[in-house]
Amino acid sequence: MCPPLLSDSLDIECSLNGKVTNCSKPSIPETKAIKTCKATHTLPYGKKNYSIELRCQSNGIWNNQLHECIPYCGRILSNSHLLMANGKKALFGAAPWNVGIYRLNKDKINYDLICGGSIIAPNLVISAAHCFWHKEILSNNISINNDSYKVAIGKYDINFTIVDNDFTQIMNVATIYLHEDYNGITDFYANDIAVIVLSHRILFSSVVAPICVDWNSTYNVLNGVDGKIVGWGRTEKGTTSPVLLETYLPYIDRKSCRDIFKNGNFYLFVTTDKFCAGFPLGREMGEGDSGAAITFLHYKFYYLTGVLNLKEKSSNNSIAVFTDIKYHVEWIRKLFNEHNFV
């Protein structure tokens, strides 16, 4: 008997003498298995997806091995199940990479949302360092040995106890890596970025998928181009939304953003690794969630461009500051290579 064929990234169909068999159980010799990438996955290095046939041999060994497919990034596959956001329709699954990061509350009874984040691999999430950092912290590598943090995937209702749909997943956190040069407000929140390693891998679907990372800094964004951001942050009415909201904000490069705030001190927070997005003329904007991604579309795929850092609140401007991913790609790449498993 050949061993069962199991894969999170492949669709596998088994048959014997023209009759369908169960691939998840041991197979009789001469059983054939056809394997293709799941709809949410593709072959690596841009190869075209194709079917491969395996055959169970008389010695109890399959004549070939299962290959791995990698998840599509930056694609929105869901086109139904509409939610309402401030009178505008937002697609259920409009940002399949978005997660909610929750912390055990003081009563140690329930979990409260503290920040957003973005999936970049089956067990890796990017967020903001300030979500986890405090002055007494002893190391920028935080091992989580208790249930103090949870990451909610495929979540649309802010209430932690509500399981929104069949795709909702609640994950424990294994380790949180804060950028080694992050030092909070002392350095005006420069290097405000974190990578979260989950204890288990995420199951991808049409509404749960990673965001693309521009590993080679191929793409640039021009001023005025709209980026997508989602979150449960405060709306223009000043209340926290019970469901995930979606909005688009125009890109503002670092120099232009600093010029907007040149008459005050807020420009100091627009550090070298920052850019801005929003409306400089008093138009209202929801606050969003710290750590959430702003993403921009490049050739039909959304890319993680910035991580929400902070918002200037003392003027009529509605502008948010984002940590620019391109300044931290090598740091992210190092952690990705050390901890990612497909």
Image: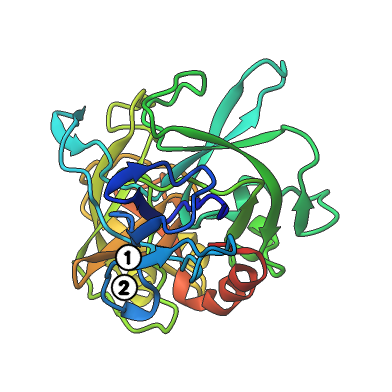
What residue sits right under mark 2 in the picture?
Answer: 256
Q: Secondary structure at mark 1?
A: helix
Residue type, numbered disc 1 = Ile
Q: Nearer the viewer, residue 256 or 135?
A: 135
- Tell me the crowding category of disc 1: few under 14, some 14 to 19, or many 20 or more residues within 10 angstroms, Cα based: some
Is residue 163 shown left or right of residue 60?
Answer: left
Quadrant for residue 326, please give it. Answer: bottom left
Is residue 68 shown left or right of residue 188?
Answer: left
What residue sits right under mark 1 in the picture?
Answer: 260
Is residue 79 shown left or right of residue 48?
Answer: left
Q: Nearer the viewer, residue 187 or 306?
A: 306
The spot of residue 86 in percent (x, y) is 20, 30
Residue type, numbered disc 2 = Ser
The spot of residue 158 in percent (x, y) is 43, 26
Vertical arrangement, residue 98 with respect to residue 152, above or below: below
Vertical arrangement, residue 27 with respect to residue 91, above or below: below
Q: Which residue is found at the position 38% from the left and 52% from the top?
A: 209
Residue 308 shows which numbered tag? none
Q: Which residue is found at the position 62% from the left and 46% from the top?
A: 200
